[in-house]
């Protein structure tokens, strides 16, 4: 119940889950930078790599849409930034972070929708 209250204030307001959704984008950006630190060290253009990680984190914050927008070339750039002949295999911890971000995003969007439904149902 404490987590439900913290994330959504018992779905009385859509502001809490929306704020948490935005904060989760920044948190997972930081998490992806930590997980992808080794490939980022090989990147010839680190700023471009950071932008790509930001696109990954904030694109994946929108449930069901983010994973569809990440194509094979994008993954190849993230996992093989020096354009070598490596297989685009994600580093350890990447897939877990990716799935956890999807789960958090789905729950928060559900709380936003539920709060909006409750708001208009009461009025």
Image (tube, helix red, strand yellow):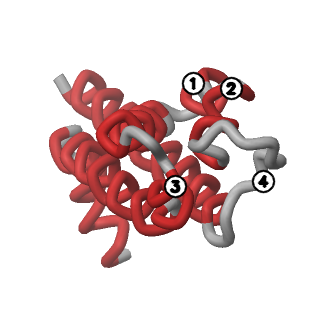
Query: Can see residue 11?
Result: yes
Question: Badge 4: how crowded within 10 Å, few (<14), some, or many (20+)?
Answer: few
**Are the two marked residues, 3 and 4, in contact with CB atoms closer than 8 angstroms?**
no
- Horizontally, residue 56 falls left or right of residue 122, namely right
The answer for how far apart the CA atoms under marks 3 and 1 are is 29 Å
Q: Can you tell which of label 1 and label 2 is closer to the viewer? A: 2
Q: How far is mark 4 from mark 1, CA to CA?
A: 22 Å
Q: Residue at 61% of width from left, 61% of height from top? A: 94
- Would you call the spot at circle 1 few (<14 residues within 10 Å), some (14-19), or many (20 or more)? few
Q: Which residue has dot 2 on it?
A: 73
Q: Position of residue 18 (x, y in %)?
A: 24, 40
| Residue 32 sits above or below residue 88 on the image | below
Upstream in the sequence, badge 3 or badge 4? 3
> Is tag 4's residue or tag 1's residue first in the polypeptide sequence?
1
Task: Judge from the rendering whether residue 62 lies leftward or rightward of residue 67; answer left or right.
Answer: left
Which of the numbered marks, if any, corresponds to residue 89? 4
Q: Which mark is residue 94?
A: none
What element does badge 3 sit on? helix
């Amino acid at each position: 119940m404490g987590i439900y209250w913290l994330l959504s204030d018992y779905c009385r307001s859509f502001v809490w889950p929306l704020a948490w959704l935005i904060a989760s984008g920044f948190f997972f950006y930081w998490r992806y930078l930590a997980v992808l630190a080794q490939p980022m060290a090989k990147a010839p253009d680190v700023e471009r790599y950071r932008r790509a990680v930001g696109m990954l984190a904030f694109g994946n914050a929108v449930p069901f849409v983010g994973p569809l927008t990440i194509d094979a070339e994008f993954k190849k750039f993230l996992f093989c930034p020096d354009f070598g002949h490596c297989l685009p295999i994600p580093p350890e911890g990447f897939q877990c972070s990716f799935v956890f971000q999807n789960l958090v995003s789905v729950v928060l969007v559900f709380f936003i929708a539920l709060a909006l439904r409750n708001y208009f149902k009461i009025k």
